[in-house]
Amino acid sequence: MMAHPLALQLRNLQSLVEIAVDKNSTVVFPAPLMSTIGELSRFLEKEAAAAARTATASLTTVNGR
């Protein structure tokens, strides 16, 4: 898990599945919120940059340049 930090998150989610077999149960499961927000921000920045590159490439193709 040290080599792959997301493995811990996947294990946590698997634990939730195992705990929540009974549909009448409530599970409070701590999550590393701040690191998840940071990862989400980086992901969204990468996606926005990729979308901008795609839009620029499309305009270049349409304009013939």
Image (cartoon, rainbow, N blue to C red):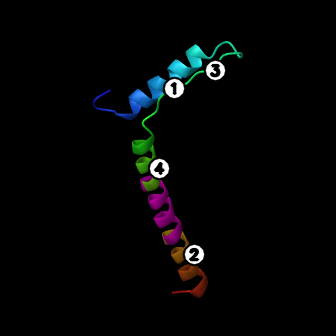
Q: Nearer the viewer, residue 37 or 28?
A: 28
Q: Which residues fall within the magenta stretch?
A: 42-52
Q: Does the segment drawn in magenta span residue 24?
A: no
Magenta-span inclusion, residue 49: yes
Magenta segment, prevailing SS (helix, strand or loop): helix
Structural distance between the alpha carbons of marks 4 and 3: 26 Å
Q: Is residue 41 above or below residue 24?
A: below
Task: Classify mark 3: helix, strand or loop.
Answer: loop
Relative to 18, does residue 52 appear above or below in the rendering?
below
Q: What residue sits 57% from the left and 80% below the top?
A: 59
Residue 14: x %, y % from top left:
52, 21
As drawn, the label of residue 52 is none
Identify residue for label 4.
Answer: 40
Q: Nearer the viewer, mark 1 or mark 2?
A: 1
Foreground pick, 21 / 25: 25
Q: Secondary structure at mark 1?
A: loop
Query: How packed is label 3: few (under 14 Cα within 10 Å), some, or many (20 or more)?
Result: few
Q: Please state which amino acid type lies under the numbered disc 1.
A: Phe
Q: Amino acid at mark 2?
A: Ser
Question: How far from the left and from the top, in percent, is residue 60?
Answer: 53, 82
Secondary element at image label 4:
helix
- For disc 1, the marked residue is 29
Residues under labels 4 and 2: Cα distance? Answer: 27 Å
Q: Nearer the viewer, residue 27 or 64?
A: 27
Spatial CA distance of label 2 from label 3 is 49 Å
> To which residue does mark 2 refer?
58
- Label 3, on which residue? 26
Q: Residue at x 47, y 24 (%)?
A: 12
Q: Amino acid at mark 4?
A: Leu
Q: Position of residue 41 (x, y in %)?
A: 45, 54
